[in-house]
Amino acid sequence: MGIDLTAEAARRRTPTVRGPSEQPVVLTVNGTHHAVALEPRVSLLDALRDRLGLTGSKKGCDQGTCGACTVWVDGRRVLACLTLAIACEGRQVTTIEGVATDGEPHPMQRAFIEHDAFQCGYCTPGQIMSAIALIEEGNAETDEDIAEFMSGNICRCAAYPGIRQAIKDVRDARERP
Amino acid sequence: MRPLAYARVSTVAEAVEIVAADPAGAFLAGGTTEIDLVRLGVARPDLLVDINDLPLHDIEDLPGGGVRIGALARMSEVARTPVIAGRYPGVAQALLLGASQQLRNMASMGGNLCQRTRCAYFRDGVSPCNKREPGSGCSALDGLNRGHAVLGTSEHCIATHPSDVAVALVAFDAVVHTAGPGGARRIPIDDFYLPPGDTPDRENPLRHGELITAIDLPPAGIAERSVYLKFRDRQSYEFALVSVCAAVRVEDGLVTEARLALGGVGTKPWRSRLAERRLLGAPATAESYAAAAAYELSAAVPRRHNTFKVELAQRAIVRGLTQAARGGMR
Amino acid sequence: MNTAIGRPVDRVDGHAKVTGGARYTAEISLPGLTYAAVVGARIPSGRVESVDASRALSAGGVLAVLTHENLPKIAGQPRLLPSLLGAAAPGQSFFPMQDAAVHYAGQPVALVVAESHEQAQYAASLVDVAYRREPSITAIDEGRDRVYEAQRLFGGLMPGRDERGDVGTALAEAPVRIEAGYRFAANHHNALEPPATTAVWEDGRLTLYDSTMGIRATQLTVAHLLGLPLSHVRVITHFVGGGFGSKAMTWPHVTLAAMAARHVGRPVRLALTRAQTYTSNGHREEQEQRISLGATRDGRLTAIRHHKLSITSHFDDWAEPATGVSSQLYDVEHYEGVHSLIHGNTMTPTFTRGPGETLGVFVLETAMDELAYELGVDPVELRLRNHARTDPRGNPWSSDGLAECLRLGAERFGWHGRDPRPRARRDGDWLIGTGMAAAAYPVAFFMPEQRARARVYEDGSAVVQTGTQEFGTGVLTVATQVAADALGLPLESVRFEAGDTDLPNTSAAVGSAGAGMVSAAVHAAATALRDRLVAMAVTDADSPLHGADPAAVEVADGRMRLRDRPETGETYADLMIRRRLADAEEVGSWTPPPLTTPHGLLTFGAQFAEVAVDPGLGLIRVRRMTGVFAPGRVLNPKLARSQLMGGMVWGLSQALLEGNEMDTRHGRWGASNLGEYLVPVNADIPEITVEFVEVEDDVVPLGIKGVGEIGQVGAAAAVANAVFHATGRRLRRLPLAAELVMDPPASS
Ligand SMILES: Cc1cc2nc3c(=O)[nH]c(=O)nc-3n(C[C@H](O)[C@H](O)[C@H](O)COP(=O)(O)OP(=O)(O)OC[C@H]3O[C@@H](n4cnc5c(N)ncnc54)[C@H](O)[C@@H]3O)c2cc1C
Ligand code: SF4
Ligand code: FES
Ligand code: FES
């Protein structure tokens, strides 16, 4: 075919290849655009915590096994530790810092306090991001569903019963007109 | 994590071209396997090609009754799609019993088929492991092998294939569609998974740069009454010790059609054809199920810490078939 | 008066934690911050032959690679002592990277510092270390020929042997004997926040942000290791993401962070990876325990022999003491408790929630269950019959409550009328069983004097401070409650501050001791300040309280008033403004009772559990748990309940899920992440009932015995006893994995 198929050639030809050096990246987090310089290998979690100062999302494992880093990307709960920041360009990222409205805590945040649904608090932002999404997904109908669909968020302090109670409260308050 | 270049592509052709051209290039879908393994130093790409903008997200009916699942459809979406939940309940259940909701929101179907084993020696990056470093030996053979496979093993590797949904897909003869540098291919899913043999590093027949575009499920038929049972130490967010996808058609007390596949015990998602054949025409009783299970498992090669899996699989198969014969879910 | 103590008030740090505003150690950002990554040894024993750092040094952003060849020597190695003592507490008496020797896998052999986290982590993977492997012992099975009896445990603090009477004869003569041996896999704390330290040097003075359960221990240990004056080391900890013992001692990475920061001349953050936590902050050691009970036919214990064998490091005689409860809980004349050890190639084990006693009580209480079956006595009744009225020295308990806990628990759980026959209840594929256990945990008084400071401002608001730290126990909240009541102020007017060694000194919060000792110090400071302000008022001619007897004055809502004529009085603010006092301040202290206090010191409780077991597949589901505890004064029932419940879940987890195996060929742990080392997820945990039994205790500080450990103790035994009731099988290993629980194949 006469086309140079070497790696170098492909990178030269395709303008879309970026990095491995730092790249200008615009991240949209909680509705705000942030222009940052990032190597493509930087995870969304590290970008939030180390570059944007949004440390509410926690790092419990960096391996997808704990849920402490749960954020929403385009409205769906995902794990920021297994997401590349650069891959979030053009997508809406929401973190725990973005769920309050006008400085008023989200009802789920209040319910967590009321039911003492945490101790050390390290898993809590991830739990809350999951808990709010859980109700949106329609996965909070039964106690079994709540327990199962919250099982991607480990709480080593073991506040699980309180977490379930907080979710039920918020779900029920929403259903009441 | 090693330095990485990154490219986001918008056409299949572009995706294939760019990865095919770069020996150190790899596709990036949900990233739940890929980013994890790059961080562990087990996967060593220099370039990740983000395929999430490709138009491979849809789930559509096929003429003639089957379903086509786009390679980028997310596990959580597929599970809640009515045609899947309704006509292939075993597939939907397998999806919902895998990983966590966050991971299912990220993980693509194509990526799921390509996920790597959870063998701790493979993942630790230092122990001898033929899958990671061909020829270095297998640390699991005489090591901590409680989670390892008993079916389809070789002296070179006994790692379990971890996917849940692939178990259901092999039970129902799904077909994997690909696009590669050499054109498009259709690969029956049972051929998609290669036994470890003496090349455990080669897990599937994909060539470098070959992209999974879709997974076809043939018309449901017996799949409509399928079940997927998963047994594990913890109640959720864990891979299977043993899982069973089963579907049984019973007429006049006799089994007229059966599908059976196992997870957690095989080096690949394990279609149990021996058991299926044994079931045909047999009375739909626990005794027949047990005999079929024993027949399938007679080839099992247990190791020091996973001997129990043979008996566990035996019992799990009987449970699965019994439940399937009762007519499906629950 | 409306008091805060005893009320279920919300956590004062709740808002910060639910909004993401609470800053944990790895979240402190500083100008010029750099990042460190540890390279851990791949081998468990041998030597580092050579380190080639050239690839790492040429990777982008790398500032330094430290190894035993260029890391400065430490100034001195402090003795290994529990941090509660208030002295340096190095976790192990070995400091890495001083020479080429390798004693355990994961031991730091190099440290990389780089401009970014990614660069440091990647460069760490490029450091080429060549090792010479030597033979190792990393599991009990490999060291059975080198077992020795431990003379002292816990850094010499406790004897390894505890004896009274003549156990051999008493057991030989006992009409009924129960003997059993148990194996327990190693446990890892897995606090959700991996330990992290950020170190900053300024003019020869060091500030450490550290994820620790004891800032004072960090200060003392690092100062000692680096040869710095204590005044030059300040440790700050705002929030800690759980500890469970893993952050009770000061592990080497903390000092390494300080050394790295000095080397590069910039602040350094060192955060351990999840995998590194399995080899960096101690663990609960792999162990075996044997117990023999001797009893009379009418169910009176006559003798207990309780032996523990475990594996420790090469350099320390560390074992969790396992016999503190078995030697005291029951009235038994002949007792022998012995701890034996094997030196091996692991790091020094450490405290893990419910240290020692949680497994010691597991052994005792499953044996008691066996005895109950042997005798045909109800298990609750058997405990009641044998509960000791005094400790073995004949001293009365500082407070008791065991009998009440057992009775209330039995009632709440619905124990009465239980059919004791195993395998008698079925629900589909599931066998149902119930089980119970007594719980007890020693109250420790090893700590030195504890101090706090209280300050009231001229507007009547107050700040109370002490150098403790918040890792989930709720200490910020209960200390605020105590201070508010003692000062006579509403809760909202009091801000409690902690987490800084510049504040008055308290010891590490371990062994359930945190809330009690901190509250006692806070109480002392706040009371002293109130007394001083009252004294000022009654001697001030312009005060409405002039001339009153201070003892007749009470304070409520910031207003001092006569108890029998509340309309007479004035506010702190009135007094202070009139006296031109911008603020007033007092330091208060609390000194623990002497170790020789003539009291028995145990916290008591009772645990009940119902399980469903699928005997075909070996699955266990805990359906419900009830725990009743007598932890003395409960400052905040909401928070206390959470902690007790957390402990019960830890017990469940210890019974069913947790354990790590050693791959002895490589000397490395089999599991090093949360996908392999299983801790419970939401779906594993049933509804849990926690009840309190009130007991008065005037020996322990403010009557508080603590809730950190007692919730866990006995819970695993209750679950295992329920599994026996369900299946008829006694399983003598933890965790109760499927392969143990499954009915064996019919043919064998
Ligand atoms: C903690 C944890 C628990 C889990 N538990 C379970 C479980 O219980 N059951 C279960 O089944 N799975 C489980 N998983 C695995 C998860 O389902 C897979 O990681 C996921 O499905 C992979 O999909 P992905 O889109 O994220 O793939 P990626 O990580 O993006 O890719 C995986 C691999 O496939 C390649 N690839 C991706 N897409 C394509 C394509 N279209 N064509 C060709 N190659 C492609 C990539 O190059 C890469 O090599 C778990 C994962 C984690 C982290
Ligand atoms: S079982 Fe396979 S993956 Fe595991 S160590 Fe052996 S070769 Fe490697
Ligand atoms: S930090 Fe992302 S799942 Fe644990
Ligand atoms: S509150 Fe500590 S881990 Fe959940």
Image: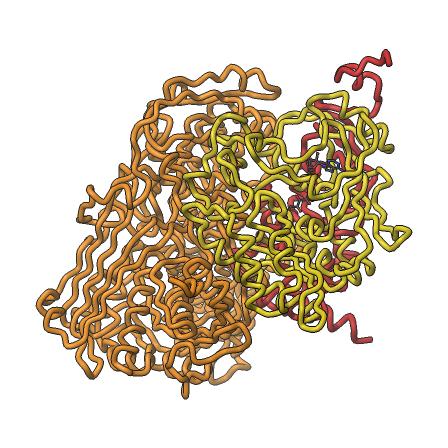
Chain colours: A red, B yellow, C orange
| Vertical relation: C73 (above or below) C105 | above
Q: Position of residue C212 (x, y in %)?
A: 45, 46
**Foreground: C248 or C217?**
C248
**Foreground: B42 or C204?**
B42
**Foreground: C95 or C669?**
C669
Q: Is residue C389 left or right of residue A165?
A: left
**Foreground: C22 or C603?**
C603
| Vertical relation: C152 (above or below) C103 | below
Q: Is residue B111 visible?
A: yes
Q: Residue furthest right?
A: B63
> Who's the residue at 46% across and 39% down the image?
B140
| Vertical relation: B120 (above or below) C407 | above
Q: Residue furthest front?
A: B281
> Who's the residue at 86% across and 14% down the image?
A1
Q: Position of residue C666 (x, y in %)?
A: 39, 34
If the image is split into quadrants, where does the N terminus of chain B sit?
top right
Q: Residue furthest top?
A: A2
Q: How many numbered discs, if any?
A: 0
The quadrant where residue C355 appears: bottom left
Q: Is residue C63 left or right of residue B55?
A: left
Q: Residue furthest bottom?
A: C417
Q: Is residue C523 visible?
A: no
The quadrant of the picture showing ligand 4 is bottom right
Q: Position of residue B4 (x, y in %)?
A: 69, 26
> Who's the residue at 75% across and 55% down the image?
A99
Q: Position of residue C117 (x, y in %)?
A: 59, 31
Q: Is residue C307 left or right of residue C34?
A: left
